[in-house]
Structures are given as structure tokens and as C-alpha cells.
Image: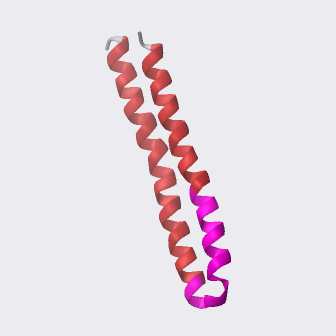
């Protein structure tokens, strides 16, 4: 396998795994936030704020995987 093909394969794996974990985490976080809001509606604002902060950190993990994928592409040239 030549270097460029291996880099494309590594890019796909990096972005795939980098999006898989945060994707499951986001689903779990939103489900937990909805459940918390249903149980205690008066805390909805605080729960929503904390959920959005957590989602932003999870999204940052996906963006880091994208950056690593592009670094792998640059290394293959």
C-alpha cells in the first residue's frame, strides 16, 4: 500500500472513531438532560446550560479528530 492510500485510510479511521465516541456521548447527555428536566422542571435552565457546555466539549473532540486527519494527509505528501 502506498503512503497516500494509507494516509487516506488513516484519515477515515481517525475521523470515524473521533466522531463515534462524541456522537454516543451527545445522545446520552441529551437523553439525561431531558430526563432531568422532566423530573424537575424548575431546574430546566440550569440543566440546559450545563448540557450545552458539555456538548461543546464533546464537539471539540470531534474537531480535534478532524485536525488529526488533516495532519495525517499532510504527512503523506
Instruction: Please say whether residue 39 is one of the residues in the magenta stretch.
Output: yes
Q: Residue at x 56, y 45 (%)?
A: 61
Q: Name the side, left or right, on which 60 lies relative to 13.
A: right
Q: Where is residue 20 in the image (x, y as percent from the top left)?
A: 45, 50
Rendered view: 67 above or below 2: below
First to last magenta residue range = 37-55
Q: Residue 49 in the image: x percent, y percent?
A: 64, 69
Q: Is residue 3 depicted above or below 24 in this figure?
A: above
Q: In which quadrant will I find the N terminus?
A: top left
Q: Is residue 26 left or right of residue 2?
A: right
**Farthest-out residue, front:** 45
Occupied quadrant, residue 36 = bottom right
How many marks do you count on the picture? 0
Q: Which residue is drawn at 52% across and 40% down?
A: 63
Magenta span main SS: helix
14 w.r.t. 5: above or below:
below
> The C terminus appears in which quarter of the rendering?
top left
Asked whether residue 60 is drawn in magenta, I would say no
Write the residue at 35% across / 15% down: 4
Query: In this picture, is 58 found above or below 70?
Result: below
Q: Can residue 40 be seen in this view?
A: no
Residue 62: percent from left, percent from top: 51, 44
- Residue at 48 percent across and 14 percent down: it is 75
Residue 33 showing in the rendered view: yes
Q: What colouring does the structure picture have?
A: secondary structure
Amino acid at each position: 500500500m502506498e503512503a497516500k492510500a494509507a494516509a487516506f485510510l488513516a484519515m477515515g479511521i481517525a475521523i470515524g472513531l473521533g466522531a463515534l465516541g462524541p456522537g454516543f456521548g451527545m445522545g446520552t447527555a441529551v437523553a439525561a438532560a431531558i430526563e432531568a428536566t422532566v423530573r424537575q422542571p424548575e431546574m430546566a435552565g440550569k440543566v440546559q446550560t450545563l448540557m450545552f457546555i458539555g456538548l461543546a466539549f464533546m464537539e471539540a473532540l470531534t474537531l480535534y479528530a478532524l485536525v488529526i486527519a488533516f495532519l495525517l494527509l499532510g504527512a503523506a505528501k
